[in-house]
Image (spheres, rainbow, N blue to C red):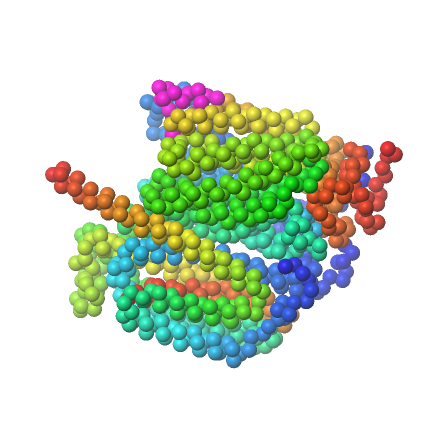
Amino acid sequence: MSSHDNHPEGVAHHFESAEQQFDSGKFGIWTFLLTEVLFFSALFVAYTMYRDSYPEVFQFASQYLDTNLGALNTLVLLLSSFTIAWGVRNAMLGETKKLTINLIITLACAAGFMMIKAEEYGHKFHEGTLWGGHEHSIFKLDADDVNEDIAAHSQAWSNPDGEFTAAVKDLDPEFRQKLGIFFGVYFCLTGLHGIHVLIGMILLSWLLIRNLRGEFGPKNFAAVDFIALYWHLVDLIWIFLFPLLYLIS
Amino acid sequence: MAPTTNTLDRTNYLNATNGFMSWFWTIDHKRLGLMYLWSVISCFILGGVYAMKIRFDLMPGAVDFATQTAEQMNAYNNAFTVHGAVMIFLVIIPSIPAALGNFVLPMMLGAKDVAFPRLNRFSYHLWIIGAVLFVATLFLGNLDTGWTFYPPYSTGHTDPSVITAVLGAFILGFSSIFTGLNFIVTIHKMRPPGMTWFKMPLFLWAIYATAVIQVLATPVIGISLLLILVEKTMQIGIFTPELGGDPVFFQHLFWFYSHPAVYIMVLPGMGIMSELFATFSRKPIFGYKSIAMSSIAIAIFSFIVWGHHMFLSGQSQLMSVIFSALTFSVAVPSAIKVFNWIATMYKGSIAFNTPMLYGMSIIWLFGIGGLTGLFLSTLGTDVVFHDSYFVVAHFHYVMVGSALFGFIGGIHYWWPKMYGRVVDGPLAKLGCLLSFVGFNLTFMPQFIGGSKGMPRRYAAYGSEQGFDDWNYWSTIGAMLLCTGLSIALFALIRSLFSKTKNLSPSNPWGGVTLEWQSPSPPPEHNFEIDPPVVGDPYDMSLVEYCGEEEGFLPVNPRSDDPCVADVKLEEA
Amino acid sequence: MSDHSHDSEGHIGHVLPLSLLLKVFGALVALTILTVMTGKADLHGADLAVAMIIATCKASLVCLFFMHLKYDRPFHGLIFLFSVMFVGLFLVFVTLDSEEYQGDIKDYKANEVLELQVGE
């Protein structure tokens, strides 16, 4: 009770100083990022295990992914990382207006990323290049199990223009089935990553609203700093996903 | 006459504010700890009911092997699934860290709260959501996969209740992660001046090691359960052989968490052991550094042995041999602890208070549990024992022996701090004794039956198999265990109905860790003196016994310490 | 670790200069272009290794500068490295196991075919 009267402003009751509070927060967010790395780990293990066992399948499957879109997404995320890092600088220096702009650009990049992803996913659903268990997937063990409508218009299935190294319908059934596993891993990895982008967008929007209310400044920028760290992790994961999924030559 | 340092008649954290929202929306770690405590105890009763169902089903004559119906078999599958899942996810994993850790950790650090009190509250709310989902599934569905949820069965033709159960477990996982995160940051950042790492109480070392496991391993079960979810709802194929997937891969994912998880269960109990043995032997703990380091060693080693759950699953010979060898190593730090506790008692002044009775039980129970683990890590013997009752008995000995008895011992130990009362009478001790005897009677026959080939997860056994005796005594033992635990719980709850009987001073047992420098129960902000005096946490000479009513008091009290200032001691 | 003395990297610590942020961004873009180029070229089996090395360089830049690790307490970086190490351990053990039992799966499948043929 004695020290409550001269407790520093803006510091929670259980912390002794603003420094201890900020330090703890930073430690906390890094520990959280550690849990996120472990959260994605199982999918990276799945990828490694299956690619190691079926390297030709993975190589074949990569041609169904649009490298240019993947590269574009990588650049978009890198830009967003740059703008949020700049935003942290803005917050620390009290440059509120610049922080607003940087937050908006970061959000725009995130939205752009999701739109490109949506385009990619839409194309795959159209083509039937999906995980084997999906009813519209062309990667069935038995070619007769493939949905007729999909088979009719899927470029991957019949390869009419010779765009791909082979037509899926002509592949060895087991090879074709394993392609379904590649896409299972692909959708899980990119799907989980996409969910994290969406969560990031919600957090960034929250930051934007708070900034517009004038809450951030040199004495109070922790939230921006910590959410930026989360955002950088989202970027980091994509930095690895891009070559692993799109550039298996 | 109430002890001077008892605050039940004054304002304390329990009565400072009233009303449902003041509890449900609290950020006070003590209130959150209590809510966790009662939530966990409720779930323990639920899991226990299913345990009794299992044992009654297995009573010779209850279900006939030759004529058992599909309903009976389904009911049994459901019973052991519910029992396992509830006990593991809802009881044992949260128990000590969430209930006792939350309460005690900040106080042991002389702090006012954990690093992130609102995250703590969020952890508890997540637990509630996960628990509700889980329990609802158990009652509305027909979960029968075993708590291990192995595909392709769990993702294939079985009940869709797998989906909500797995979702519930996923949410519970996040509760666990956030609790662990909170504890790690608190211990790193909020130790008082003078409390270096090697001046911390060993309970905190144990909680810290546990928290490290929680944050590293739990995310992996999170993603594994998520994958079961997408596998079952969308047939993603990663674990399904018909789609080219690999079911053994799930087992790798599952056990990468679930093996370290058993150390999440066991380590905190061991931390409590160190506190109990020092306090009730009136001696500093023997080998402080080796116990502290062994906690970290166990945490790290726990991550490299998971394959010993998969020796018969199709795991390659190479990896099985590697995992077997590594598993032997993890026994070493655990054994170091046991020897140190025993050495602490040597030439000590042993007091047989209830918490110490639980502690001493653990030496026996954990000793047997740990030693039988060696038979399971040996490849040759595991071929025989895998999926037999030998395994069931082994893990019950370690989980109940170390985790549950540690939990109950810890509850009794810190009950004075939590509720301002001491529960240490004949009834409490009877509860411990009956539980100990009942437990051994339940599970010792299972070692024997298992070594004679009795497989687990079977609804019935034909009499000609020769397992009837073991099942009979095991069920008798279960009834005794149930009685013992009920008596223990009764004694605890009964104490809450009186505001004049068995009141506790601030330090009834003579512990030297910081929480005993606070009144019983503490005020909202934990301490009346700010900051409390930091010394060697096991230097028993810092306190002296001043009679049954006033308990132990500091030898050199501070003049501003209300815990001693008003104490009127009777002339000796 | 819990010293409360003023820490020059602590509270209103190091503010990253804009020029540094821009340089790092530039390097990241350049490395991305390099990744795509090497991805399209045939590197005789070293593809994965090269791609991962470049990705690690990019990740290091993001971690050290954007995420401030170069100017932070070393412990934070250790936490991150620690997590990656554990993932590595997980990866190695599982992949090793999978490699080892692929042979068993092939044998089993071969026997299945054999039995089907014999059964006819």
| Residue A73: % across, % down | 38, 70
Residue B36 is left or right of residue B280, and the answer is: left
Q: Residue furthest left?
A: C120
Instruction: Answer whether residue B467 is magenta in the image.
Output: yes
**B372, A106: nearer the viewer:** B372
Name the residue rendered at 70%, 46% in the picture. B537
**Does B391 sit above or below residue A208?**
above
**Does A207 sit above or below residue B448?**
below
**Does B18 sit above or below residue B51?**
below
Q: Residue furthest right?
A: B571
| Residue B460: % across, % down | 38, 25
Name the residue rendered at 41%, 44% in the picture. B323
Residue A6 is left or right of residue A96, and the answer is: right
| Residue B45: % across, % down | 54, 34
**Does B551 sit above or below residue A145?**
above
Name the residue rendered at 30%, 47% in the picture. C101
**C27, A36: nearer the viewer:** C27
Which image quadrant for residue B471? top left
Q: Which quadrant: the N terminus of chain B?
A: top right
| Residue A159: % across, % down | 19, 65
Residue B195 is left or right of residue C21, and the answer is: right
Instruction: Answer whether residue A113 is magenta in the image.
Output: no
Which image quadrant for residue A14? bottom right
Residue B170 visible somewhere in the drawing: no
**A95, A215: nearer the viewer:** A95
* Range of magenta residues: B455-473
Residue C25 visible somewhere in the drawing: yes
